[in-house]
Image (cartoon, rainbow, N blue to C red):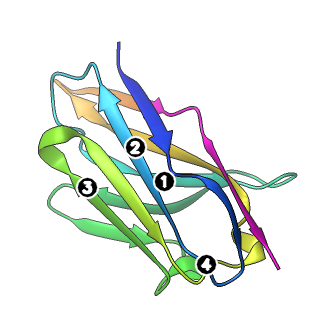
Amino acid sequence: QVQLVESGGGSVQAGGSLRLSCVSSGSRFSFTVMGWYRQAPGKQRELVADVSVGIGSTYLDAVKGRFTVSRNGAKNTVYLEMNSLKPEDTAVYYCNARGSYVSRPYEYWGQGTQVTVSS
């Protein structure tokens, strides 16, 4: 059974930094896409950043220049370096892995880690 486990969330003041990590277990293959979503109270979950094999990285406009996503494909891990954090970045951040294997789509989610940015 595939599991994604996030760590690194917490509370910081505006302008601070956090680094999120997501470690997977139970997969026999490398995920096509790994990345991060977030969901703030009363809002829909949104894509923050992801990394696709052979394509590269995608970022939410609001985090471009402040966040950096990276991954270790061999280990199926993904990281999110968050700098210059703003109160509007406050949300639960979820690790995501998706793609297809033997023509079957898959998608996995972590349990989420809280990021709180105070002004």
For the residues labelled 4 and 1, the Cα–Cα distance comes to 19 Å
For the residues labelled 3 and 4, the Cα–Cα distance comes to 22 Å
For the residues labelled 1 and 2, the Cα–Cα distance comes to 9 Å
Q: In the rendered image, which residue does mark 1 sit on?
A: 36
Judging from the image, what secondary structure is the residue with disc 1 in? strand
Check the image and report above or below for 19 versus 109. Answer: below
Pointers 4 and 2 in contact (C-beta within 8 Å): no
Q: Residues within 10 Å of mark 2 (few under 14, many from 20)?
A: many
Q: Position of residue 45 (x, y in %)?
A: 67, 51
Q: In the rendered image, which residue does mark 3 sit on?
A: 71
Magenta-highlighted residues? 108-119
**Pair 3/4: label in front:** 4
For the residues labelled 4 and 2, the Cα–Cα distance comes to 20 Å
Q: Given the image, on which type of amino acid does mark 1 rest?
A: Trp
Q: Given the image, on which type of amino acid does mark 2 rest?
A: Cys
Q: Position of residue 71 (x, y in %)?
A: 25, 55
Q: In the rendered image, which residue does mark 2 sit on?
A: 22
* Residue sitting at x 24%, y 44%: 32
Pointers 1 and 2 in contact (C-beta within 8 Å): yes
Instruction: Count how many numbered circles sit on residues in the image.
Output: 4
**Pair 1/2: label in front:** 2
